[in-house]
Image: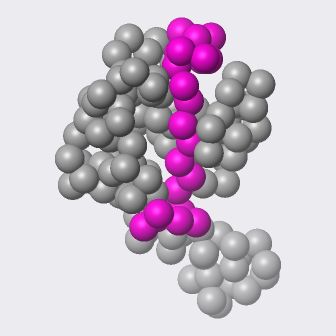
Amino acid sequence: MDVTTPTFEAEVLEASRTLPVVADFWAPWCGPCRALTPTLEKVAKDYAGKVKLVKINSDENQELAAAFNIRSIPSVIAFKDGRPAAQFMGAVPESQVRAFFDKLLPSESELALAEAEALYEAGALDEAE
């Protein structure tokens, strides 16, 4: 999904409150960007429903590039809870992209805690324990 300055808040910041959003800052003339894009798209497809991938053309959205201090492209920034959470620069191999996406997902203990909290709030104290 292409994101622009006017859609950034809704598509990235607000969306990152429910699932991690990976923003790829790129430009059409950038060779390493063209090399990284298929890898990002492949990995994002494998993580569908768990991580959202967006693309931001840094030439057309210079305000966003400046706001996030993009000095070199490709630059990839992950957003969680409305804030940048992790990032990398350059065309990296698929294994590194997968490791980057993995870091964004909640751990087993975080998932168990969230489930217990939900059960507690619902009054199911025995199940929450």
> Which residue is rendered at x = 60% and y = 75% of the image?
115
Question: Quarter holding the N terminus?
Answer: top right
- Outermost residue on the bottom side: it is 126
Determine whether, in the image, residue 8 is placed left or right of residue 36.
right
Q: Position of residue 85 (x, y in %)?
A: 46, 36
**Could you tell me which residue is drawn at 38 percent across and 58 percent down?**
43
Residue 110 shows up from this direction: no
Among the 4 quarters of the image, the one containing residue 19: bottom right
Q: Residue at x 38, y 11 (%)?
A: 71
The span shown in magenta is 45-66
Colour scheme of the rendered structure: one colour
Q: Residue at x 53, y 65 (%)?
A: 48
30 lies left or right of 53:
left
Quarter of the image for residue 18 reads: bottom right
| 12 on left or right of 74 | right
The quarter of the picture where the C terminus appears is: bottom right
User: Residue 22 versus residue 35: which sits nearer the camera?
Assistant: 35
* 115 vs 23: above or below: below
From the top left corner, tell me how far across and down residue 10 is, in percent: 76, 38
